[in-house]
Image (cartoon, rainbow, N blue to C red):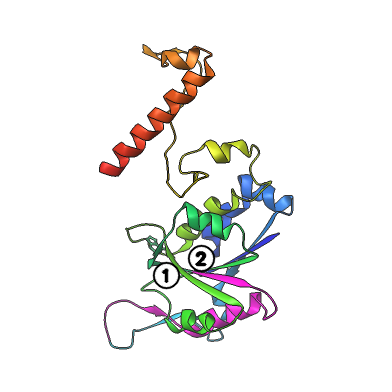
Amino acid sequence: MLQIDLISIFPDYLTPLKLSLLGKAQDKGIVSIDIHDLREQTNDVHHSVDDTPYGGGAGMVMTAAPWGDAIDAITNDQELVDLIILTPAGKKFDQQMAADFSKKYHLVFACGRYEGIDARVGEFYSSKSNFKVHEVSIGDYVLGGGEVAAMVIIEATTRLIPGVLGNPDSLTEESHSISGNNDSLLVEYPNYTKPSNWRGLEVPEVLLSGNHGEIAKWRKAQAERRTQQLNKE
Ligand code: 6GU
């Protein structure tokens, strides 16, 4: 069972994690997802979670104390924890990272906002022997906060866990599945379904031929052509 905890000042933003395939996986006991409000770790009347940056500059920085208290409250020293800090300055998320995360026991997602979280939070947990800290970004653009990025990572990660997907064969056939021999990524061939003629557009003849050898050859060539096209754009 994979335990996933998320910490955010906008816990309602993360409610889609209860729906669909992930909702079913939680009902089946394959994953457990718990969402925590960072502000529950504050004591002052304003429940403040940020302050001005040392050294000056624009924006606000999230203070370390509520983050440390929130992380301590959902972990213990006897377990292995992978702490994922969402930041546009992190390592770029990819399919290999999803495969690695899908084999973990306990993932904790720290969804920062504003100009990010005080750097000592990552530093503190990095020094603990049972923690591994990952600073992760989902791409080269800036979001308002880590919540959507965390959902992207959780969706890509949990669907790789046996029993989460209805049809496990779709894992090996899809776009960006990591091929068996090495880490080369091949995007998927184009797919078609009935009718064979739609608005005058015909499905490629070979797919109607019933010749499985020719179909496999055509699909491989299409996947290679598309991958090449993408990589030169
Ligand atoms: Cl993880 N956070 C924010 N705020 N922006 C991002 C991101 C994360 N990944 C890409 N852009």
Q: Does the residue at mark 1 contact the one at mark 2 (Cβ under 8 Å)?
A: yes
Q: Can you give x and y, in whole percent of width and height, for residue 212 in the image?
A: 53, 19
Q: Give the range drawn in magenta.
A: 56-84
Quadrant of residue 217 in the image? top left
Q: Name the residue under label 1.
A: 113
In terms of sequence position, does the residue under pointer 1 or pointer 2 come before the other?
Answer: 2
**Residue drawn 52% across and 15% down?**
211
The correct choice, above or below, for 171 with respect to 192 in the image is: below
Quadrant placement of the C terminus = top left
Q: Mark 2 points at which residue?
A: 10
Quadrant of residue 140 in the image? bottom left
The correct choice, above or below, for 145 with respect to 60 in the image is: above
Q: Can you give x and y, in whole percent of width and height, for residue 23 in the image?
A: 65, 49
Distance of label 1 from label 2 (alpha carbons): 10 Å
Question: Foreground mark, 1 or 2?
Answer: 1
The correct choice, above or below, for 164 with respect to 229 in the image is: below
In the drawing, what numbered circle is on residue 50? none
Which amino acid type is marked by label 1? Arg
Which amino acid type is marked by label 2? Phe
Q: Does the residue labelled 1 lie within 8 Å of ligand 1?
A: yes
